[in-house]
Image (spheres, coloured by chain):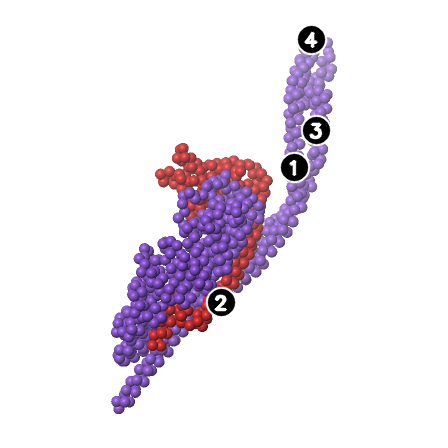
């Protein structure tokens, strides 16, 4: 019954790594497992360190890009936010600055959901001279009763020295059961 | 201002997503205000599950001081993001620092619980143990049970079977976890050599009425484990019952069928043993149970004196093992060529980063069938995650390398444009003597003061009025008007009238004109102040721009080599990770091949024995 015993042992060791076959065999398996675990951990720690370094490098590159493309004294950032959003499902936002179209952003379902959960989307960055500028934003999507909805909002703002943040806010007007679109400077 | 959920609320969301719980309505987070748009932007990426960009933005905003309003919350969010991204060591460092008494106990517990889970999966047993030690006694029941299970797993994985048994023996409750606890207890008992006690535990579990697929699978596993443990303990009759309880279509059915056959064979009932073994014949050769049945069948046939049939089956088995071993060799070659990992990366869309990613399917190909079960192991899955993350980092660095080249070009172009414009600007500035203009403005002020003090209404006459005044004065001094004749008197009266009207007009408008003149001079003064400010700005720019260019140049040209260096390290780490994955996969395949080799040797011996016996019988017959 040698064959029989050997096969059973093999199966059992595969199933549960039981110790009954032989202590030496189990020790060898355990040693191999421990060595493999150790190797994995060492590699994993290297990967973790690399991730940290690449993330820090990305931060520096991100800042460099922003400072190079949008210097603080001319930078204007436009953010879209959604508060509650029960009366409006956002599809897209179109932006015109001083009569010129600068952005037309289509939102994916995932992005719209991220907005609904409280995220704020930087939809556009621009370099503008100091002085007055006019912003027109057109919001399209589905309004109450899932009807197509298209609304505009406008703001004239004064660009001074230093970065400026403009918020395009979609809120619910509960009394009228309608969405409301407001553009304002971030306070 | 926006209303939204922030950290620790967002962290709470994250942990809730990670740890399935019956999260009651009372725990619904309160909406609070996002005070910095950049913080909201990080949340946007976080909710989109784009963890890498979210972390980069958060780090950048922190460095710029743009999310000072959120302070510690932002730091906690960063910890949560690191955790989601699979950067568990960094996440833990943040949580260790911040998850102090000021954070809600439940959030703290969930965070440590989740870290314990990740670390156990990644084989960081010490860290997993440490994370469990941070859990409070107020942990919700469901997590409490899972935490105990983690603890038992740590004990088992680190060979502390007695401690595992101690913990699991006192398990309370009748939930699904109780079944898993029983299984782990049975395993720990078997591993500690206490088969009799394990028999009872696994036996109870093997008779469980499963309410779902997971429990059905656990039941099969317990029956199989018990059956083989009894077989090994020399109790074939007792082993049959649990083995026959294993479902025929489940993942453990092959091994169960094989075991049932061995139970009969051990009882010397070879005819019955052939029934389950023959059933295995048509199944997938990849399964070791199927391979073994190819030896078991001729073994039983031999015992039943069907020598010729047994020899045929041995020959078939040798042929099948040979072909299978060749396929394994080819697969090992394919894996060692690295193509499998290239294929795997080519199929991966790289659109998401994070710890939650899991490879569900291997790239199609003949090798995939050998590696499917590897996917079920934590080590291989976690290794693949690391490999994929490294590929993402490599891709990310490649993109930045391209961008940095563009930045360098942009900077050079700007610098060139600046150098070209500078002489023109300097020339224009040289011509515009603002100081002289200011001096003239002061002179105007003084002049206006004099006019006001001297009530010099004529000084404010316009050009036309001044001409008229001159003409009238000219008429007055005309000698003809001195003649003593009525016509001269009449003209003289008219001249006097005109002069009087004009003077009256000028005097009447004097204050108004003086105010307008002063207003114009004041405006000029304001414009001059603006011009002086602009001039200072230009001077500053001319002074600082070269410094800015230098600073940007240093950054741009400094970051390029950094990216290069990092790319090399990432490539190196990818190579090491790939070697590690290869070693797991190849090791697994070699083990399969060794098993086939062992079976082949056994088959050849058995065949040789048959031939010897036949030859001996033939010899005796002659």
Q: Nearer the viewer, residue B127 or A132?
A: B127
> Is B12 drawn above or below residue B329 in the view shown?
above
Secondary structure type for disc 3: helix
Q: Which residue is mark 2?
A: A35
Comparing labels 4 and 2, the label whose residue is closer to the camera = 2
In the displayed structure, B572 sits above or below A143; it is below
Query: How far separated are the C-alphas under marks 1 and 3?
Result: 18 Å
The percent coordinates of residue B510 (x first, y second) are: 66, 20
Q: Assess disc 4: are there few (<14), some (14-19) or many (≥20) residues with their C-alpha within 10 Å of its C-alpha.
A: few
Q: Are marks 4 and 2 on the same chain?
A: no
Q: Determine whether, in the image, residue B541 is placed left or right of residue A11.
A: right
Whether callout 1 and callout 3 share a subunit is answered yes
Q: Quadrant of residue B621?
A: bottom left
Residue closest to the eye, B241 or B442: B241
Chain under callout 1? B
Residue A135 % position (x, y): 50, 38
Q: Which mark is residue B486?
A: 4
Name the subunit of mark 4.
B
Lower sequence index among marks 3 and 4: 3
Judging by the rendered image, the residue that carries numbered circle 3 is B444
Residue A71 percent location from the top left of the image: 58, 45
Q: Which chain is purple?
A: B
Is B550 located above or below residue B449 in the figure? below
Q: CA distance from mark 1 to mark 4?
A: 63 Å
Between discs 1 and 4, the one toward the N terminus: 4
Given this view, does label 1 or label 2 mark the residue nearer the observer?
Answer: 2
Question: Chain A shown in which color?
Answer: red
Q: Chain of mark 3?
A: B
Q: Going 48% across and 41% down the picture, which residue do you hit?
A: B32
Mark carried by residue B531:
1
Q: Secondary structure at mark 2?
A: helix
């Amino acid at each position: 019954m040698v064959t029989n015993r050997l096969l059973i042992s093999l199966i059992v060791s595969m199933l549960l790594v039981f110790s009954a076959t032989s202590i030496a065999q189990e020790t060898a398996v355990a040693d191999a497992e421990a060595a493999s675990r150790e190797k994995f951990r060492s590699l994993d720690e290297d990967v973790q360190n690399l991730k940290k370094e690449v993330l820090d490098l990305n931060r520096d590159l991100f800042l460099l890009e922003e400072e190079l493309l949008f210097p603080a004294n001319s930078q204007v950032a436009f953010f879209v936010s959604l508060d509650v959003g029960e009366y409006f499902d956002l599809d897209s936002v179109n932006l015109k600055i001083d009569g010129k179209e600068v952005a037309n952003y289509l939102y994916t379902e995932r992005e719209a959901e991220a907005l609904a959960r409280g995220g704020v989307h930087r939809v556009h960055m621009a370099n503008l001279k100091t002085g007055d500028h006019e912003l027109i934003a057109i919001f399209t999507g589905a309004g109450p009763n899932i009807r197509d909805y298209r609304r505009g909002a406008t703001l004239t703002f004064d660009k001074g020295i230093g970065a400026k943040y403009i918020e395009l806010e979609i809120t619910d007007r509960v009394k009228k059961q309608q969405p409301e679109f407001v553009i304002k400077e971030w306070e | 201002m926006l209303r939204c959920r922030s950290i620790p609320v967002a962290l709470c969301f994250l942990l809730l997503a990670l740890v399935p719980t019956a999260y009651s309505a009372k725990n619904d987070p309160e909406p609070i205000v996002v005070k910095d748009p950049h913080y909201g932007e990080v949340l946007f990426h976080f909710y989109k599950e784009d963890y890498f960009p979210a972390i980069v933005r958060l780090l950048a905003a922190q460095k710029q001081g743009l999310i000072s309003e959120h302070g510690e919350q932002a730091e906690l969010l960063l910890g949560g993001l690191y955790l989601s991204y699979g950067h568990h060591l960094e996440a833990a460092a943040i949580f260790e620092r911040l998850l102090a008494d000021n954070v809600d106990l439940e959030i703290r517990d969930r965070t440590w619980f989740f870290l314990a889970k990740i670390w156990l999966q990644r084989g960081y047993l010490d860290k997993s143990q440490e994370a469990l030690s941070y859990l409070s006694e107020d942990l919700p029941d469901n997590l409490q049970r899972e935490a105990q299970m983690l603890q038992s797993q740590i004990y088992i994985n680190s060979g502390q079977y007695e401690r595992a048994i101690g913990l699991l023996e006192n398990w309370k409750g009748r939930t699904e976890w109780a079944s898993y606890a029983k299984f782990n207890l049975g395993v720990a008992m078997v591993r500690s050599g206490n088969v009799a006690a394990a028999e009872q535990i696994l036996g109870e579990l093997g008779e469980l009425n499963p309410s779902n697929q997971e429990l059905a699978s656990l039941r099969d596993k317990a029956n199989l484990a018990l059956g083989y443990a009894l077989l090994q303990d020399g109790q074939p009759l007792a082993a049959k019952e649990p083995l026959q309880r294993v479902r025929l279509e489940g993942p453990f059915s092959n091994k169960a069928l094989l075991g049932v056959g061995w139970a009969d064979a051990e009882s010397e009932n070879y005819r019955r043993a052939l029934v389950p073994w023959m059933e295995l014949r048509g199944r997938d050769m990849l399964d070791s149970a199927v391979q073994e049945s190819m030896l078991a069948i001729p073994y039983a046939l031999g015992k039943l004196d069907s020598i010729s049939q047994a020899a045929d089956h041995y020959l078939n088995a040798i042929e099948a093992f040979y072909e299978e071993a060749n396929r394994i060799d080819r697969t090992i070659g394919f894996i060692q060529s690295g193509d499998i990992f290239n294929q795997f990366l080519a199929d991966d869309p790289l659109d998401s980063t994070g710890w939650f990613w899991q490879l569900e399917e291997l790239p199609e190909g003949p090798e995939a069938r050998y590696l499917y079960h590897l996917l079920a192991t934590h080590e291989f899955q976690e290794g693949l995650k690391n490999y994929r993350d490294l590929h993402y980092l490599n891709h990310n660095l490649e993109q930045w390398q391209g961008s940095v080249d563009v930045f360098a070009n942009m900077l050079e172009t700007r610098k060139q444009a600046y150098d070209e414009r500078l002489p023109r600007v300097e020339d224009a500035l040289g011509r515009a003597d603002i100081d002289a203009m200011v001096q003239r403005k002061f002179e105007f002020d003084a002049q206006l003061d004099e006019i006001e003090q001297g009530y010099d209404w004529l000084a404010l006459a316009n050009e036309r009025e001044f001409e008229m005044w001159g003409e009238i004065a000219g008429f007055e001094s005309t000698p003809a008007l001195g003649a003593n004749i009525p016509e001269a008197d009449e003209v003289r009266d008219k001249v006097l009238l005109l002069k009087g009207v004009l003077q009256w007009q000028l005097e009447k408008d004097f204050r108004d004109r003086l105010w307008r003149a002063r207003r114009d001079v004041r405006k000029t003064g304001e414009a001059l102040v603006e011009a002086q400010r602009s001039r200072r700005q230009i001077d500053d720019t001319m002074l600082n721009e070269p410094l800015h260019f230098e600073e940007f140049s240093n950054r741009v040209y400094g970051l390029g080599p950094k990216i290069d260096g990092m790319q090399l390290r990432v490539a190196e780490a990818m190579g090491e990770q790939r070697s590690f994955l290869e070693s797991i996969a190849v090791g697994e395949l070699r083990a399969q091949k060794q098993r086939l080799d062992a079976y082949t040797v056994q088959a050849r011996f058995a065949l040789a024995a048959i031939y010897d016996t036949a030859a001996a019988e033939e010899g005796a017959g002659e």
